[in-house]
Amino acid sequence: MRIPKQRKGADRGAVQERKGRGFHHRARLKGRDRPLHSGSVGEITEGSDMNNNHVYDMLVVGGGPGGYTAALYAARAGLDTVVLEKLSAGGQMALTEQIDNYPGFENGIDGFSLAEKMQKQAERFGVHSEYAEVLRMDLTAVPKLVETSEGIFRGKTVVLATGADPRTLGVAGETELLGRGVAYCAACDGMFYKGKTVVVVGGGNSAAADALLLSRVAKKVILVHRRDTLRATKIYHEPLAQAENVEFRWNSVVSALLSGDRLTGVRLRDTVTGEESVVDCDGVFVSVGRQPATALAVGQLALDGGGYIVAGETTETSIPGVYAVGDVRTKPLRQVVTAVADGAVAVHMAEKYIAENR
């Protein structure tokens, strides 16, 4: 089932109404709040099959940059490949208003357009895109089984490119201010705040790293943490303390976002005294962790403490023939460019696996 042209345009309109850099609950975009995983692996039955027992060389779950790069490399290597995507190509990248750090676009490019280009390039080499919600998987079966809203798909290998969502503050107006002062990725959006005042919320390694990165471009960085000391590893403490433009607000949480057309400031609440104060700022970077979309993998693949699929630079998981690419796997940097690199590596490893298991 291919998505009609007019539906893709409608999806783009919905995306543009919610412009934001680096984050969106994709299920909410279409008014669908169903989880990615329901039921158990054992519930996959042949009776719901709509695909005539066809066995693909590769099933790609997720149509983001990592997924479509894997599909492109697989198709060019002669592998019969299908991409299973619930909404539209691009994943979170499609919700990014401007991407300036992906090579080859000197004036930058919006995420939706880049996603369309990636999809069309892969499909030019024979990749099939199936718009379907993945319900459950059996990754140890031979062939591997993926049950979707459009039937059961079988594959010799599976690439998981399901991504990860940033955790939110959960305060009023947060979604509406995406791209207008609220951001979730300092590496992506930091340069938009050059010479301005920004707030970073969080106390772990990601918040500390974001604060240090932003201190090199912003006029002032205010690090807000709900405790009286950082949870980040000690390696970050001294550089932050020495940064002249970094200020700390301990025992504080963001209780409200202040705005007109854009964010103008935040209201902080002291977790000890309950007192509130207002901080004027141009941007808020929320760095309170991410939620990987790994519900499908629970009970099958090895996950780390944060719920990410354990997979190194080879992208190989704990099950042979299953690969994890992009934001869903354990890795130090989650960017479009690292996701596409993962996709290429996954196909290299999958080719070896298929050759060894003929």
Image (tube, rainbow, N blue to C red):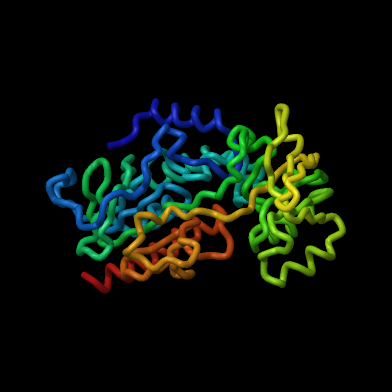
Residue farthest to the left? 47
Relative to 20, 9 lies left or right: left
Closest to the observer, 235 or 1: 235
Q: What is the number of callouts on the image?
A: 0
Q: Quadrant of the C terminus?
A: bottom left
At a point 30% along the width and 61% down the height, the residue shown is 157
Residue 138 horizontal/vertical position (percent): 25, 59
- Relative to 320, say whether 279 is above or below: above
Residue 223 horizontal/vertical position (percent): 75, 54
Determine which quarter of the picture holds residue 4.
Answer: top left
Residue 297 appearing in the image: yes
At a point 70% along the width and 60% down the height, the residue shown is 208
Q: Quadrant of the N terminus?
A: top left
Relative to 26, 178 lies left or right: right
Residue 198 horizontal/vertical position (percent): 76, 46
At a point 49% along the width and 41% down the height, the residue shown is 25
Relative to 128, 67 lies left or right: right
Closest to the observer, 14 or 287: 287
